[in-house]
Amino acid sequence: MPIPSDRQLADIRPASTPLNRIRNFCIIAHIDHGKSTLADRMLQMTGAVADRDMRAQYLDRMEIERERGITIKSQAVRLPWAVGDEAYALNMIDTPGHVDFSYEVNRSLAACEGAVLLVDATQGIEAQTLANLYMALDNDLAIIPVLNKIDLPSAQPEKYAEQIAHLLGVDVDDVLAVSGKTGEGVAQLLDRIVMEVPAPQGREDGEARALIFDSVYDSYRGVVTYIRVKDGTLKSREKIQMISTGAVHDLLEIGVISPEPTATDGLGTGEVGYLMTGVKNVRLSRVGDTVTSAARPAQTPLAGYQDPKPMVFSGIYPIDGSDYPDLREALEKLKLNDAALTFEPENSVALGFGFRCGFLGLLHLEIIRERIEREFGIDIIATAPSVNYRVVTQDHQVVTVTNPSEFPSGSVEAIYEPSVNATILTPTEFVGTLMDLCQERRGQMKGMDYLSEDRVELHYVLPLAEIVTDFFDQMKSRTKGYASLDYEAGDDVQADLVKVDILLNHDVVDAFSAIVHRDKAYSYGLQMTKKLKQLIPRQQFEIPVQAAVGTRVIARETIKAVRKDVLAKCYGGDVTRKRKLLEKQKEGKKRMKAIGRVEVPSDAFVAALSADMPEGK
């Protein structure tokens, strides 16, 4: 690997960096195509990180990211680079690849003028590659196509270079081949970024306007805000103002990330960096807001971001009720760090006080759950994932149902469920099995395109409820891991849905209720009653566990009573004496069943709600 020259290591101070020497770009790709590894090589080759300090996935700051080998948060970093005798400042943003974190990619694209489109030379173009490319084109970014992992024996750079060239309408020679692992071709890529990514535009002498594209919470220094300066200059120790709220703060520190936070005198037009005001209130720094100077404020805010629409909903409850205030604070801090998370208070008869949270997908839900438990030390129960439904009642009122307990009683006229427009990329040999899977999940085929002789793109409209559980796992297992999925929100469609209630001793337990398609109601009820029969401990009286649609019971299991041997003390005498004791016991059981309440232990709730839900859900 080449050793950086003195010119590449030269410190580029923001105050002295001309606008035409700044390049802002991000790396976009499908999951596991090598974005973080390429970013590591760039950090080394530009001298931003010394070899002795280098570690794999350097920009992945969270422990959970390093464990799973995925990027969850986009990270901005400043790289010095020289072409000839001219020194440049490259502001790079490493983005996530999973569809659940596409909102992070969208925000990152708004802070850049160019994008490196990375494609694995062993796998080629995949679903999220196309989705991220279209987002970059919508933002009018300069696209630099790059093939990664060319050092692997199974790499086919010529084949996939033609695919990319055909997709973008460029020459095959314009597709750069690199290896993020060995560093081959990375220097040429940095040169291409300097040459092809346009310099940022803005009014250097205008009122200061900076877009907040991310925020994190530091327990010692308060809210740390990441900004992209569009116009003017922000200087250290001046007063700044948030345009949306009008709040004024002292600017205690401003600087760049290179790759550790480095304080500077200020940030000029086109710069990407961070600022700290010492504010501890997480509500005062909203992603998409505009920061300006309080002394000379701008009147017009920058165009922010479209709020993401939650796709999957789950109830999150503390196992210990006294942790409720801590859970609220934890969710507020996570929302600062993850603008796609939504939550509102909710009360459940069975689980107590908690929050109804909205997520972009199942992986997003899983990551948030783990972060709450690891970073804040709160033990929680998360109910089975569900989606939003729109219910039209007989008197033509429209009710939005995020939780089965909100389902209106009585007859309904129509129920609408959210759908998604799914794109599946697969080798041709797996087309049949994927079409079967989509039909099982009530999918409607909208088209099929052959990208090449051995690669097909399937377009389906699928109910969101059918893909938020195990659709992705099923797709991967049926295609030996070769297929890839991307989806975006579609329209609400009318469906034949019913609410399945679970009753314990004839009392509805709202936490176990679910809204499912009529064809799958029986299988859901049967599996849930069997599961609860195993989880709930036996009582002194017999407990019926029932699944019902309206007033009609569709499945039942019975938890047998714990019986006491009342005949043990009866040794002799007439049979009528024994019968009298048995009748007395029977009457007692009947009275106990009438007044007794079934207490479901919390570990049974955790097992029933957190375990893999049956396919009907």
Image: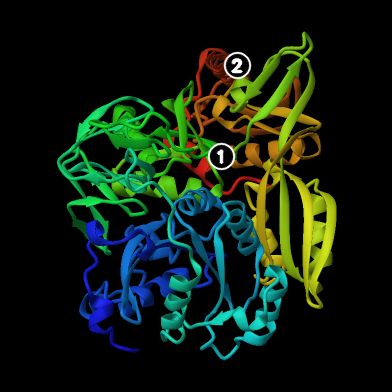
Which residue occupies 38% across, 36% down? 290
Q: Are marks 2 and 1 in contact (CB under 8 Å)?
A: no
Q: Position of residue 477 (x, y in %)?
A: 67, 66
| Residue type (three-letter) at the residue carrying disc 1 | Ala
Nearest the eye: 158 or 409:
158
Relative to residue 333, is residue 427 drawn left or right?
right
Location of residue 58 with respect to 249 vertically, above or below: below
Location of residue 125 with respect to 296 vertically, above or below: below
Q: Position of residue 511 (x, y in %)?
A: 54, 29
Nearest the eye: 449 or 597:
449
Mark closer to the chain start, 2 or 1:
1
Location of residue 474 with respect to 450 vertically, above or below: above
**Label 2 vs label 1: CA separation?**
43 Å
Please name the residue that numbered disc 2 is placed on.
583
Which residue occupies 42% across, 86% down? 182
**Considering the numbered disc 2 on the image, is that residue within a helix, a strand or a loop?**
helix
- Which residue ends up furthest to the bottom in the rendered image? 153
Q: Position of residue 420 (x, y in %)?
A: 71, 44
Relative to residue 165, is residue 352 drawn left or right?
left
* Location of the N terminus (image quadrant): bottom left
Residue 262 falls in which quadrant of the image?
bottom left
Q: Position of residue 413 (x, y in %)?
A: 81, 18
Q: How many residues crowd mark 1 within 10 Å: few (<14), some (14–19), many (20+)?
A: many
| Residue type (three-letter) at the residue carrying disc 2 | Glu
Q: Is residue 504 visible?
A: no
**Considering the numbered disc 1 on the image, is that residue within a helix, a strand or a loop?**
loop
Relative to residue 248, is residue 104 drawn left or right?
right
Image disc number at residue 384: 1
Relative to residue 322, is residue 104 drawn left or right?
right
Foreground disc of the pair 2, 1: 1
